[in-house]
Image (tube, grey):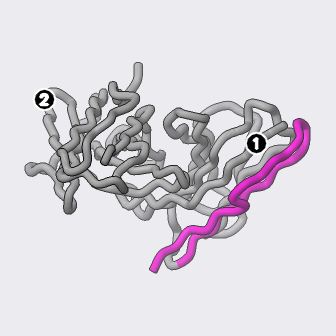
Amino acid sequence: AQKITQTQPGMFVQEKEAVTLDCTYDTSDPSYGLFWYKQPSSGEMIFLIYQGSYDQQNATEGRYSLNFQKARKSANLVISASQLGDSAMYFCAMREFQYSGGGADGLTFGKGTHLIIQP
Amino acid sequence: SQTIHQWPATLVQPVGSPLSLECTVEGTSNPNLYWYRQAAGRGLQLLFYSIGIDQISSEVPQNLSASRPQDRQFILSSKKLLLSDSGFYLCAWSVGRQGYGYTFGSGTRLTVV
């Protein structure tokens, strides 16, 4: 079973509108972290925002916020006032901490959402 | 400040040829290091991770291997490339067991012909 599911392969949004990118996850680990990355056409992975499973409040970073609904295992990314430069692939990722066996295993990624901002 | 260097940026190699991709980190010590592969239009798949020198864990069976000869150097290798090895390879680092500051290199686009 997929641990990270992003159901929107692609999205077209008008500039200045708000965007919500969906992400659901699957884990039985009580301690985990959720990440969003942006990948422009150049290929680099740019960290956007992080939410820990025990964080009481939704994470925010500038125009980015994470709508964390723990019971629904949902971690949607919200981009306010979208800009043309927001056009990119967006990946949701998760890391399980308690069940990682004390190692440093990496992030599990979803398949991504291709966001295109239209003028 | 911490930086991560990955090279080359682009590589075209014939089937059956060897491969060596290098990743180095500056400005930190004892980082956790990772190699990911991204197939066209897909998400990232973790290939290897390392918590220290000569300590390598493999996530998936494959035609590739990894080595960490120095604390801040991580190398991805293959003795004989396959067509299926084509993809975008990304190196990343983090610090600490629960460190969430995963930082990625700029990636290597490998095409096996």
- Image quadrant holding the C terminus of chain B, namely top right
- Asked whether the viewer can see residue A93, the reply is no
Q: Are marks 1 and 2 on the same chain?
A: no
Badge 1: how crowded within 10 Å, few (<14), some, or many (20+)?
some
- Asked whether the viewer can see residue B30, the reply is yes
Badge 2: how crowded within 10 Å, few (<14), some, or many (20+)?
few
Residue B85 locus on image (x, y percent) = 73, 36
User: Which quadrant of the figure has residue B105?
Assistant: bottom right
Magenta stretch: includes residue B5: yes
Q: Is residue B80 left or right of residue A74?
A: right
Residue at (51, 65) in percent of width and height: B31
Which subunit holds the residue at mark 2? Answer: A
The residue sitting at the front extreme is: A119
**Residue nearest the viewer, comparing B47 with A110:** A110
- For numbered disc 2, what is the local secondary structure? loop
**Residue nearest the viewer, comparing B32 with B104:** B104
- For numbered disc 1, what is the local secondary structure? strand
Magenta stretch: includes residue A45: no
Q: Is residue B87 left or right of residue B33?
A: right
Label 1: which residue? B111
Residue B80 locus on image (x, y percent) = 87, 39
From which residue to which does the magenta span run?
B1-26
Label 2: which residue? A71
Residue B38 locus on image (x, y percent) = 58, 40
Residue A65 locus on image (x, y percent) = 18, 51
Relative to B80, say whether B26 is above or below.
below
Residue at (22, 49) in percent of width and height: A79
User: CA–CA distance between discs 1 and 2?
Assistant: 43 Å
Q: Amino acid at mark 1?
A: Thr
